[in-house]
Image (spheres, rainbow, N blue to C red):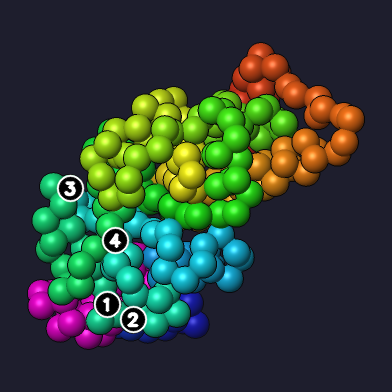
Amino acid sequence: MVEERRDQRGGRDAREGAQEVGEAWGRSARPEEVEAWEALVATARRTVSEGLVVGTSGNVSVRVGDTVLVTPSGVPYDRLSPDDVTGVDLAGDRVLGSLVPTSELPMHLAIYRATDAGAVVHTHAVHATAVSTLVPELPLIHYMAAALGGPVRVAPYATYGTPELAENMLRALTDRTACLLQNHGTIAYGMGLDQAYDRTAQLEWMCRVWLTASSVPGLAPTLLSEGQVAEVGERLRGYGQR
């Protein structure tokens, strides 16, 4: 009975939350949209607390059916509330909320149209951004590149928020789940927010490792071959609990 009461209470809270947020959005919100927005806000705040972005740089989105919830432009993440929800359809037309979506919306939508992504995280992480200015591809410093599909490419620079940047990004993401954006930052996607965030953090960590190893005078880091990374990729398919 305890479990049953908790489930019923949780369902009631979700419905009440949906009604409250629905008023802010101007239409009735589905419970899964309320939950997705809360998770998106938590992820956006995490990018700040863990040093992956500064201020309102970077952005986060999550797909719920044919609606993409995305951080609004210029709103500090610690101030985001249910009233700030921003949702668009896959054509980029606003369907939820009144705030302007992030200026990087073209990148997010390009990923959703081209992949089965459920969430996207874009950051201006320090080490990853530094690497993006030095090489066309992150050297294979660690086997966890396999978790991102292989060697991580750098998308050529283009002005933020433009279709050109989205096109460059998609090419760099071919058979990959993350890439670097030259003189800009990172972008990664996953089936959900946790996976997209974890891939972002993994990429930033590998960039930091390569920069650290490369900074030792008179020595060059040992790199892995694509074959070695591909072998790890096969092993990762069976990694974890099932």
Residue nearest the observer in this picture, 188 or 172: 172
Badge 2 or badge 4: first in the primary sequence: 2
Badge 3 or badge 2: first in the primary sequence: 2
Please give the residue where the numbered disc 3 appears in the rendered image: 90
Whether label 1 touches label 2, CB < 8 Å: yes
x and y, in percent, of residue 28 in the image: 13, 74
Decide: is 179 above or below 149.
below
Q: Distance between the residues labelled 1 and 2?
A: 5 Å
Say what amino acid the circle numbered 4 marks: Thr
Does residue 190 appear in this view? Answer: no
- Residue shown at 47%/71% (left/top)? 55
> Which mark identifies residue 157?
none
Callout in the foreground (3, 4): 4
Whether label 1 touches label 4, CB < 8 Å: no
Residue nearest the observer in this picture, 205 or 197: 205
Badge 3 or badge 4: first in the primary sequence: 3
Please give the residue where the numbered disc 4 appears in the rendered image: 102
Say what amino acid the circle numbered 3 marks: Leu
> Which mark identifies residue 81?
2
Q: Which residue lies furthest to the top in this view?
A: 227
Circle 4 sits in a helix, a strand or a loop, which is it? loop
